[in-house]
Amino acid sequence: MHLQPVVYDLNRLRKIVAELAPDLLCAEITRDAWEKGGLSNVALEISAALAPLVAASDIVLIPVIPSLEQFTDFTPSAGWRRSLARGFDRILRWGQRTANRPEAINGVMFGAFCHTLCWLTEKMWTENDRMTWEAQNKAMAKNIMQAVRRDPGRRALVTLRCQRLHVLLALLRTYSDELEIVDYREL
């Protein structure tokens, strides 16, 4: 989405993060990829916008994803389930282009839209794929909490793909005694 001619492009993403100036930036990159500088297999948002910002600032990037598997990697390999999952992904991308602003992307309406499409897409996966996705999200929440605990009192910004938002928010809310989650609209 960020490469298309939209208001919410990579420059806008970089500007938002720079203005927020978090102490810690938890991002969907593996520790191994970050330490080795292997940014070719990570999301464009990280390689083209966030990594250069981190390099030019005091922001500390915390890799929180345990593996490179992404939501779309679980798309069935063939058949009607694959066709439906790919259709849901096209609808999601349309919605992202239509929302076109960080405020809208992080809004209630888009959140419900995204959550519904993600839920429908996950129904196309195998049980093993759903378990793998759930385990990956739990590991990410654990890694985020380790970063927060390691640096108490620091402001942490968690950047992630929209498909994870509804899952990770629920997982992180279980730690409400240790952290305060601030919604994008409240910043």
Image (tube, helix red, strand yellow):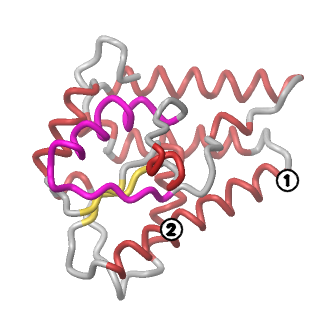
Circle 2: element type: helix
Query: Position of 136 compared to 78: left or right?
Result: left
Magenta residues (range) = 42-64
Q: Residues within 10 Å of mark 2 (few under 14, many from 20)?
A: many
Query: Position of 184 compared to 135: left or right?
Result: left
Relative image position of residue 107 (x, y in whole percent): 31, 44
Callout 2 amino acid: Ala
**Residue shown at the point (43%, 81%) measured from the top left:** 175
Query: Position of 53 compared to 66: left or right?
Result: left
Examine the structure image and report whether residue 55 is included in the region drawn in magenta: yes
Q: Residues within 10 Å of mark 1 (few under 14, many from 20)?
A: few
Specify the quadrant that holds the N terminus.
top left
Identify the residue under disc 1. Answer: 127
Of the residues under marks 1 and 2, which one precedes in the sequence?
A: 1
Identify the residue under disc 2. Answer: 141
Callout 1 amino acid: Glu
**Residue shown at the point (59%, 66%) measured from the top left:** 139
Relative image position of residue 148 (x, y in whole percent): 34, 75
- CB under 8 Å between callouts 1 and 2? no
Question: Relative to residue 165, is residue 53 depicted above or below?
Answer: above
Specify the quadrant that holds the C terminus.
bottom left
- Of tags 1 and 2, which is closer to the observer? 2
Q: How far apart are marks 1 and 2 (CA)?
A: 21 Å
Relative image position of residue 69 (x, y in whole percent): 65, 43
